[in-house]
Image (cartoon, helix red, strand yellow):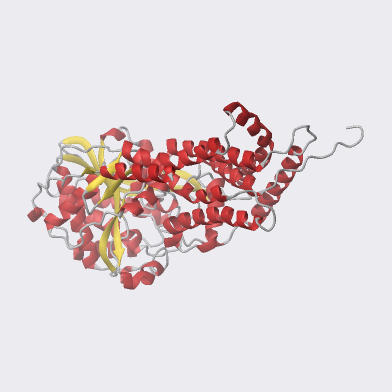
Amino acid sequence: MSQRLALVFVVAISLAACAPVPDPPISYNPDDLRFSGEDALAIEADFVTRFPDRDSGEPNNLRAAAWLAETLGALGFDCTIDIWEFVNFSRVVPLHNAVCVLPGESDQQIVVTAHHDQAPTTTQGADNDGSGVATLVHLSEILASEGTPPYTLVFLFADAEEWGNGGTVRYLETHPDPEKILAAISLDNLGKRWYTGLDMDPRGRFRGYGPVWLQRTAQEAARAAGVEWVPVIRPALFQALEQAAPLAFMDEGTFVAAGMPSFGLTGICDSDFLDECYNTWHDPSDTLETQSALSLGQAGRATEALIRQLFLTDEFPRQPGRYLYFESSAASLRGLPLTLIFLLPISLFLARAFLIDRRSLAEKARAWRSALPHYLSLWLPLTVSVVLLYGLVEVGLLDKFTYYFATTKDPAWTHPRWLAIGIWFLALVGMILLSRRLAARPSAALAPSHPTIRSLAFLAIGLAAIFVLLTNPFSLIFMLPLFSWLLIRGRRWPGYLLDLAFFLLGGLMIYFLIYFFGFAILRIGLYILWYLLMMFAIPMIHPAAAVAIAAILAAGLSLVVRPPARRTPAAGE
């Protein structure tokens, strides 16, 4: 009861500490807006019909980059083509960024990016991302004709967005002074005729979340322009879940991860046409027939309004992520109050580890030593199995990738490497059997009691949770389902089925959270298991995080797997 009261108290105090977010001042003149959806659609038609099949590594990829550099260069931009290589499907792929700079009165930069590559499962790649490219080209026509802007304007036509934001990663890696970038906006999927609004995606590439002030500025700049599609800030629940698993699917992710104010602008599909939007995404049917001058006009005017307002903005705070913004009250929760909420699950697991009985700390430590072989016999094989995945990549049984594993709707998603999976699984089982046998070596020590096993398991979970807190506190959300493990009691048959149900409940709820809020839009079903395996293999999941995940899984398994039986020494042993 006291724990529940403490939970309610901390949450109440934290929510009461929400700080108001002031409305951003809007000082640009809406009458200056000149963006035309019809002109943008004409540019898009020219681009996607002139350069179909421009996915990374294809001949039209370089031709598209060269055409963009030539087109903007004629308008007064200083354009260069950056050529480099990376590895995808174990093959070296040539890549090309077109970087176009309009010098300003200040050398500090505002970057707007769209990717000129397309998914290899498409032909024209009209909406993704011919629409973003056309928007940038039309904006370059407008802004270059107005003389020197207050800030230097960079239009980045990035390559390899479909392969893990490779172009924007390269841009920041080769930038002479990234600190001069004040803000960055990514444009992607803006032109479909089924769109009815604009969404702002602030997810970082593995870390970070775009600041509220920039999203609020985009909203108020659009309202001042009379744009019907005012960009939408995502609800607080989605903010929390997206910060828990910050896997960016747009090019803003690279800038956000670097701590720069950024978000991605993309279309919102009409709820009555969700199937049409999905079926024409990363598909040969992503053609000009899906595009609308109205949609491009709304998105383009909102983007132009934001750029013009940023030209008149004096402060560009690089506020860190880890916040929750509540639009209904125009307030945000961050800092210590938010940290207190994050500490709750850690405190509960550690309290369970130390308060499961009334023995002294020294007695607990001796008991943990007796349970340690049982725990290590599960944790070590899981950890070594991750190293085995790295080895399978190196010997060619699994493909090698510099960044992400494939693109959505790629056949690689639905054709697992069964030989590699079989080798990995059999090796994992073999390592577990061997380690369990070693853990059962003759000893005078008694087998640990289940309360001792539980105490050590929750200590391991608590320590892993501290690691999560230090790396990405929002990821603790994925540990909340593990509270069901607190109900495991080490029952004998048939009560063991209840313990097993509590164990599976925690795991399935984590699977649901990861799938629904990270991959449901991709409609890949159970193939998420194959994708997650590859995330460990390449490794999209950092090795330290993989070790922590193995520690948590081993803790859960130790609760439902009986300790290895002590062997009776044979004669002569």
Is residue 115 visible in this depiction of the protein? no
Total numbered circles:
0
Please tell me which residue lies in front, 507 or 16.
Answer: 16
Q: Quadrant of residue 558?
A: top right
Which residue appears at 23% of the width and 59% of the height? 299
For the C terminus, the image quarter is top right
In this view, the residue in front, 528 or 436, is: 436
- Residue 48 lies, in percent from the top left, at 33, 63
| Residue 61 locus on image (x, y percent) | 39, 54
- Left or right of 495: which side holds 305? left
Asked whether 234 or 285 is in front, the reply is 234
Residue 238 position by quadrant: bottom left
Q: Is residue 192 above or below residue 32?
A: below
Q: Is residue 61 left or right of residue 528?
A: left
- Residue depicted at x 74% and y 36%: 446
Q: Residue at x 35, y 55 (%)?
A: 64
- In the displayed structure, does residue 476 sit left or right of residue 196? right
Tell me residue 67's x, y (percent). Answer: 31, 53
Picture quadrant where residue 118 is located: bottom left
Depth check, front residue: 278 or 51:
278
Can residue 70 be seen at all in this image of the molecule? yes
Residue under the point 35% across and 41% down: 10
Q: Position of residue 355 (x, y in %)?
A: 53, 37
Query: From this viewpoint, which residue is outermost toward the top?
Result: 362
